[in-house]
């Protein structure tokens, strides 16, 4: 069995929750945990996590959200040379936390140091 690494995709609405598409408000989580095959270089973890996330969880209005990827409190950056969905087969969404904090539109349980994508 190959080794896995777990990261979290943090999904934060950038518009008031009541203005989200009805599907997005009901079906997009505030956080998604993603396991990535350890053969993927750390510099590609954010790309692999987002590939898996977008493959598993469609978003109707992507412009209404800010997505970031964190590993043990460290914000991970996407690479400019990444080809979308090319790493989807090396990562899987394994858990999701639903709901947003209406007070400031932040996803529930968001790490303080998550940087936006």
Image (tube, rainbow, N blue to C red):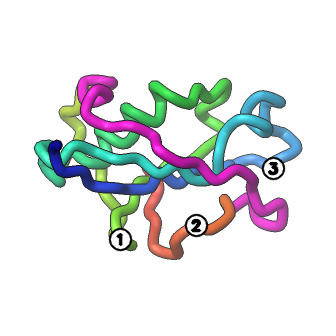
Mark 2 residue element: loop
Residue under the image location 19 percent in, 33 percent down: 81
- State the quadrant of the N terminus: top left
Residue under the image location 88 percent in, 44 percent down: 18
Q: For marks 2 and 1, give the CA distance.
A: 12 Å
Q: Nearer the viewer, mark 2 or mark 3?
A: 2
Instruction: Please say if 84 is above or below 15.
Output: above
**Upstream in sequence: badge 2 or badge 1:** 1
Label 1 crowd bin: few (<14), some (14–19), many (20+), radius 10 Å: few
Q: Does the magenta portion include 99?
A: yes
Q: Horizontally, is 116 left or right of 74 in the view?
A: right
Mark 3 residue element: loop
Tell me which corner region of the image, top left, top right, bottom left or bottom right, holds residue 42. Answer: bottom left
Q: For marks 3 and 1, give the CA distance.
A: 28 Å
Measuring from the top left, give residue 87's x and y in whole percent.
Answer: 25, 30
Measuring from the top left, give residue 66's x and y in whole percent.
Answer: 56, 48
Instruction: Please say if 15 is above or below 106.
Output: above
Q: Horizontally, is 93 left or right of 80 in the view?
A: right
Q: Residue 110: which numbered mark, if any?
A: 2
Q: Does the magenta portion include 12?
A: no
Which segment did they paint magenta? 85-106
Residue labelled with disc 3: 16
Q: Residue 108: which numbered mark, if any?
A: none
Residue under the image location 81 percent in, 50 percent down: 16
């Amino acid at each position: 069995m190959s080794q896995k690494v777990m990261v979290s995709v943090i999904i934060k609405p950038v518009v008031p929750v009541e203005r989200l598409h009805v599907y997005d408000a009901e079906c997009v989580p505030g956080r998604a945990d993603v396991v990535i095959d350890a053969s993927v270089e750390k510099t590609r973890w954010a790309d692999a996590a987002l590939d898996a996330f977008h493959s598993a969880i469609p978003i109707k209005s992507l412009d209404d959200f800010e997505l970031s990827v964190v590993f043990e409190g460290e914000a991970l950056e996407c690479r400019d040379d990444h080809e979308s969905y090319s790493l989807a087969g090396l990562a899987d969404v394994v858990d999701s936390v639903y709901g947003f904090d209406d007070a400031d539109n932040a996803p529930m349980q968001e790490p303080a140091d998550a940087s936006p994508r």
